[in-house]
Amino acid sequence: MTDAYTRFTRTALGRQIVKKAGLPNPARLPRQADRPEPVLDPVVVLGSSAGADEVAALLLDWGADVRRRFEETPRVGSVVVVLDEVSAPRELGEIVLPLAGAMRSLAPGARVVTLSRPATGEDLARDAARGGVEGFVRTLGHEMRRGGTANGIQVADGVALTAPGVATTLRFLLSARSAFVDGQLIEVSTDAGRRPQQWDRPLEGKTALVTGAARGIGAAIARTLDSLGAELVLLDVPASGSELSRVTNELRATPLQLDVTSEAAGARTIAFLRERGITLDVLVLNAGITRDKMFANMTADRWDAVIAVNISSQISLVEALLSAGDDGADVLAEDLRVVSLASTSGIAGNRGQANYATSKAGVMALVAALARRLGERGTANAVAPGFIETDMTGRIPPLQREIARRANSLQQGGLPLDVAETIGFLCAPGAAGLRGQTVRVCGQNMVGR
Amino acid sequence: MTDAPASRSTPYTVPSAVRDAYVLGGNRLPFARSGGAYAGVSEQDMLTAALEGLVARFGLQGAQLGEVAGGAVLKLAGDLNLTRESVLGTPLDARTPAIDMSKACATGLETVTHVSNRIRLGQIEAGVACGVDSASDAPIEVSVRLRRLLHRLSRARTAVQRAQVISGLRPGDLAPLPPRNSEPRTGLSMGDHQAVTNAHWGITREAQDELALASHRNLAAAYGAGLLDDLVTGYRGLGRDENLRPDSSMEKLAKLKPVFGTSNPAIAEPTMTAGNSTPLSDGASSVLVASRQWAEENGHAPLARIVDTRIAAVDYVHGDEGLLMAPAYAVPALLDAHGLGLEDLDLIEIHEAFASTVLTTLAAWESEEFGRERLGRQGAFGSVDRSRLNIAGSSLAAGHPFAATGGRIVATLSKLLHAQAKQKGKVQRGLVSVCAAGGQGSVLLLESDGK
Ligand SMILES: NC(=O)c1ccc[n+]([C@@H]2O[C@H](COP(=O)([O-])OP(=O)(O)OC[C@H]3O[C@@H](n4cnc5c(N)ncnc54)[C@H](O)[C@@H]3O)[C@@H](O)[C@H]2O)c1
């Protein structure tokens, strides 16, 4: 799955040229299969708050080799920086500076995760300190080397640092499942949810519907949710039926051939689920298309098709499934998880993608509204992939594609697997405290925040 | 899911008497026009895809079935084990046996009969009947002279001998021979044969165009109603039959020029056009057939029971009967055996090789003379209620990849009968009639209780 340039950098000649010319030198990113343990040892926990002690205990509980300082700790694999009690910017230095001297000696694929609280608008100095963490995390994302990443968790006031949502997020960010998530801040707003019985198969006994599952990111999502224990209903357009049946056969899933933009899509999905006695715990709205054109040349057919597939279809499907219970058996289980596919184009905009960016920015607002509407019934979030190596990006002209692929801190395109892992994380029972957020899977793409 | 005694939970008892076989469902590819979406795709690829879709729909991953019976009419010599090779490419247990069968356009229906008979006799519990054809990838043969020359060349020992053989080659020998689409004994194409039958029965152009139009409208409506959602699996970017023209009209059909019977001086006004004849097509279909016990154990509700089948052939060589008229004989024989008349059938599927094959068959059944002289009855056999005929469209709209047509009809009709029986709360009967080259015909009776 590596691109031609990256393969070149791994040849003897390639290595020399890259070094001499200062060309991008993308690191090999270990994924879950390469590094299955949740924490890359040893892990240093920085900070002296009560929260820091709790986090250290949690990590010990996971079997990690936990240290509280860098001295006498060679090749640190992970660093957790606990900043939950900072009340003014000047307090940050004491906690974070010990990491400075260790930055160059971190292990390949190292993880830095900060734990802090979001600004609330209540206290000038405290908000400034809390807000400052964002700049710190994003900068470390840029400065990490050899495939290492830096991310942060913002835990709402009143939510313990060991709450299910925090633990689930921390474990995801420390693991190799988050290989292509870099420079991001994820907010845990409630202490809802529960820690899974088995961390490796949190979706055991759950059923998920994935749209656009015949290929690309959707097929990867299906494989990941399957490996996390979920039963699957896989949906794609009739024209992709044979590809869909191949994925279905591989995962022993249930195929559903349907165009999500068709008028009866909601009704047909409901009838299909009821006929088979299926209730859904997880809904992944992945089906999406691009019809790129500079806005000056935009035509109604291109605009409308993108809006219809990428956003309108999601609204009607969700509305239909949510209200199925009004006139028959419910098709959604309690504690629902909805994850939709946004895009970095929806965050920063992108030349030639006015239609696509509109639809994807719409997705981000949609999940925020849906999370509010679901309330106790579950949660909704989105992922915003950056450049992912799929058929969709394979259609970008070669030079443009090469530039887009390198324009992030990890200097490479992500894999469909990376998006799928993040979705698996958001679907877990423990992720109930994440509400209406958009998590970027972009290797810290240069665009947007 | 195994037929092997060693690994099954509850032993199946081999019945002393015949038991029933049921259609559980089917899966086919959308049919493509020859040279269209599946140009350059092998029959093995298509058949494998159709079977994979069936496996996905019925959760048959890893299942060892009793047998998969399949075939293709236009088959490459190298594909002698086409069905078995296709099975090996699916997630079915590799110990699932397979057989290749062939009976021109009736191949698909005969595979259903074969699997059904195996089940009825207690030899297997579940099997798949399937068929595939590609007119786009039809085998091309070399001339007889070239073939003999190539054989001699391979036997030649020395360069001189080889040069001698090659020097005997003439340019004309190199022209490939496309598959013959004419009857070997008459030299007439099937369409030209049908044109004669047509003239005999006085079938009008308008009646043929009307039937063709109904076929397109019915199939389009069936897609619209979702009937094909669990009968078809898209392939190579095609989600629906490529030949389907939902916006066809009598005016458009009337504009087409006749293509068959045009050089026969006995036919004053040729009526058969590309619009009311089936196009050459590519595609594959499959049907899952099983015993009731197997269906129950694997959590599937049978759609329809396979009641019985009949075959017939006519002597078209000596002009005694039209080439495609055999079903006109097989159907009365089948219905008589069950004490049924045409009026007892709730749904009727007559394969539309040409619009006129359906119409000449109906005309023959309505004819007193045909009834008396050909069928040896008191009078006419009867007439078909047209509102029960081909109600979800047939080959004129869907296309006709020869060996795949039988499976398409059986799966579709089973689903229709099941839905109708459920809705009406009573048993529904349906008939399938397929004509074939060589003056042959195969017919099959289905029944559903809607449960
Ligand atoms: N590839 C990337 O770099 C990238 C980046 C950001 C966001 N995304 C998003 O990720 C999602 C998947 O992208 P991908 O790269 O795998 O694309 P893809 O084109 O490879 O796959 C999309 C799938 O969705 C299906 N689909 C399209 N329209 C449909 C409809 N109307 N009904 C049902 N299914 C339909 C397609 O048949 C296809 O199987 C999309 O929402 C896309 O916008 C991708």
Image (spheres, coloured by chain):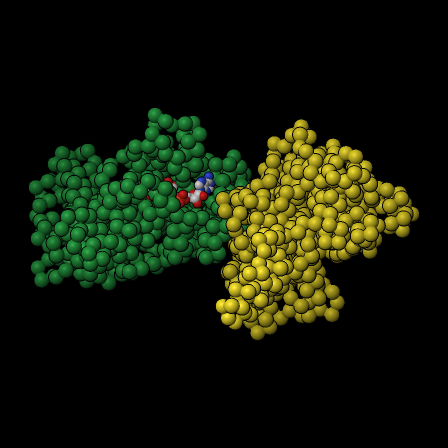
- Residue A109 x %, y %: 21, 55
- Compared with B213, A190 (above or below) is below
Q: Residue at x 61, y 32 (%)?
A: B247
A350 left or right of B18? Answer: left
Dividing the image into 4 quarters, which one contains the N terminus of chain B?
bottom right
- Residue A301 x %, y %: 44, 29
> Can residue A361 be seen at all in this image of the molecule?
no
- Compared with B396, A194 (above or below) is below
Q: Residue at x 15, y 52 (%)?
A: A19
Q: Residue at x 67, y 28 (%)?
A: B251
> Can residue B146 be seen at all in this image of the molecule?
yes
Q: Quadrant of ligand 1?
A: top left
The image quarter in which residue B243 lies: top right
Colour chain A is painted in = green
Colour chain B is painted in = yellow
A384 left or right of A204? Answer: left
